[in-house]
Each structure stands twice: as structure tokens, then as C-alpha cells.
Amino acid sequence: MAGDLKLGLALGYWMAEPPQGFVELAQEAERLGFDSVWSAEAWGSDAFTPLAWVGAHTSTIKLGTGIVQLSARTPTATAMHALTLDHLSGGRVILGLGVSGPQVVEGWYGQPFPKPLARTREYVSIIRKVLAREAPVTNAGPHYPLPYPGGSSLGKPLRSIVHPLRADLPIYVAAEGPKNVALTTEIADGWLPIFYSPYRNDVYAESLAGARDGFQIACPVTVVVNDDVAEALKIVKLYLSFYIGGMGAPDMNFHFDVIERFGYGRQAQRVRELFVAGDRGAAAEAVPDDLADEISLCGPAARIRTRLEAWVQSPVTQLLAGTRDPVALKILADAR
């Protein structure tokens, strides 16, 4: 198969307990030639610690945060995490950032949600200043002023004690709205979409028009190996129903908006109604099979290999396989 599509392993965030065997899975991905492994955070496990554990048991695979939530840490704290892990891993870190949504930002972190684009721009700018280490870090912006304009009035600009291993440590931004994606092409080295359809590249074409050469698109894609395609799609439909119906406020759900832009607005509204009413099973069933199929790789090995070609031909540069199945990793590795 032609193309330069890189492969990554998306471990996601933990559920009720730490997942078993995630280090061994990352080691297998590394053995198969995968370029990267990614961890996430929501309101439980954090993104950095699992990567430190994986990094200690691997040697070449890149370590990506997909994603670190802006409101969980100040920009300088995030820069400290990234430069520390980058040193420990020998320069393998990809720093993925995202604003999350108002329910998490204000309900979990106790931080204000408004002005997400301005906050993201300021956050990334400060991290780049820390990594460049050209001068003590200052910031005159309203969201993360440095030094803090108040308090004891004794704050002073500081420069990282540790010399970062790389001033150009790659920063990717998770974004969903058209303006957010356009901003990402301006300030970041890559984009982390939550959902993407290689059959609807036009949805984001305008937002990506300003992307410079070398800009990366690293897309999580659920991979389920099963001879029964309908059974495989049930897994995708289950998590899609959660993101459409329960992951966000009823009047501000960015995941819902993405699905609507894909052309499934009416069906997404029905999924949300069923989910909010408490009928989770019916909500999952109401997710269109075509939608679930577009954004995933499901079915027997031959079908997955065939449908992978659409991703190779798309603007996506890194396919981050969401799976716990070593067989799925082998199928992808062999198909490249």
C-alpha cells in the first residue's frame, strides 16, 4: 500500500481501574514499527503518568498526550511536565493540548470556560517561551498573566532551571470547531481531531487551508477486528452515543456539532434525546451504522485493509489506532 500514513496506538484514558497490559501493548506497537503511543485524560487518570511508565519500558516509540486539558495545569506547569518527560525519554514527547468543554473545565477544574480560542493561543505561546528558554518568561495576556498582577506583588519573571532538550518539541492541538481548527494550523505543529471521516474531507478543507508544509493531522480511529461487521460497529456506536448524548452540555456539545457537520444532525438529535432520557441502549442503536463505519476501521482483516486506503489518501498523516487487540495492530502494520 502506497502512502506515508504513520501509525500510532491510542490508549485513551482509564475507566474505573487501570487497564491491564497497556505497557505490553505499547511494546508490541513499537516492535511492529508504530510511530507513537498516546494517552488521554478526562476527569480521572492524567495523561502524563501512563506515558512515563510506557516510556520507561520502550525505547523508540514517540509518547503523545492526546490530550492534556488546558485547565488542569498552568502553561508553565504543562511545559515542566513536557520538558521533564522529554529528557527522560530521550526526546520522544509530542505535547497534545485541548480546552475540553465547559462541564469539565468549570465543574471539575473550577476554571472559567469562556474565550477558549484566546486561551489556547496564549497557553501555547507561553509553553513555547519556556521551551525556547531565551529569556525569563513573561506574558501580558489576560488569561495567564506572568508575573501575576496582584497578590503579594513580589512575583518576578523566571526562566526554567532545566534546559529543555528540544526548543521545538512538537505541540498538537485538539480542536473541533472550524475556527479552532484554523487557529490550530496557525499556532501548532499538528491537529488532533476527535472524529474525522476520510470520506468527507471537505468538512474541514477550508479550516485546514492555511496549514503549512509538515503540519500533522493525528486522528484517533477505533479499530475492531470481527468477521461480523455489525457486531464490530456496536462498539463504535456505543461510545459515539456517549459523546453525542452525554459528553457535553445540551446547548454546548462540540462533539454533537461535529456529527452535525458530517450531515447526521437529525440522527444525532435523536441519539441525544434517547441518551438524556436514560435509554442508553436505544441511544447506541440510534447511531447510524454509516456514521460509525466512516470514522472507524471495523470488520474482518481484509475489509480493514481495504478501508485503510481511504485514510492513506486523506489529509490525515497519523492514524492513532484505538484498540486493545494486538491482532488489530498487526493487521495495520502489515497493510502499510
Image: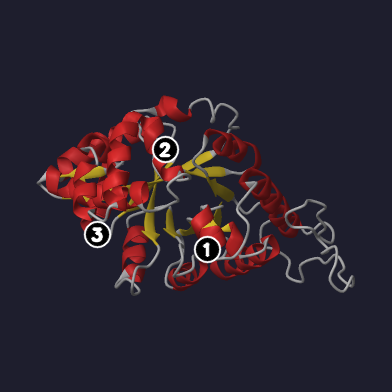
Note whether 324 is above or below 154 in the view shown. above
Mark 1 — residue? 107
Q: Distance between the Cα atoms at labels 2 and 3?
A: 30 Å
Q: Position of residue 39 (x, y in %)?
A: 44, 61
Between tags 2 and 1, which lies in front?
1
Q: Is residue 92 visible?
A: no
- Give the residue drawn at x 61%, y 67%: 81
Query: Is the residue 30 above or below the residue 316 in the image?
Result: below
**From this viewpoint, is residue 189 visible?**
yes
**Disc number lying in front (3 or 1):** 1
Residue 329's spot in the image, x, y percent? 27, 54
Asked which secondary structure carries label 2, the reply is helix
Is 104 placed left or right of 15 in the picture?
A: right
Q: Residue at x 24, y 42 (%)?
A: 287
What crowding class fits label 1: few (fewer than 14 Cα within 10 Å), some (14-19), or many (20 or more)? few
Q: Nearer the viewer, residue 14 or 110?
A: 110
Q: Which mark is residue 258?
A: 2
The percent position of residue 231, horizontal first and vertical second, equals 13, 49
Residue type (three-letter) at the residue carrying disc 1 = Gly
Q: Which residue is mark 3?
A: 326
- Quick one: quadrant of the N terminus? top left
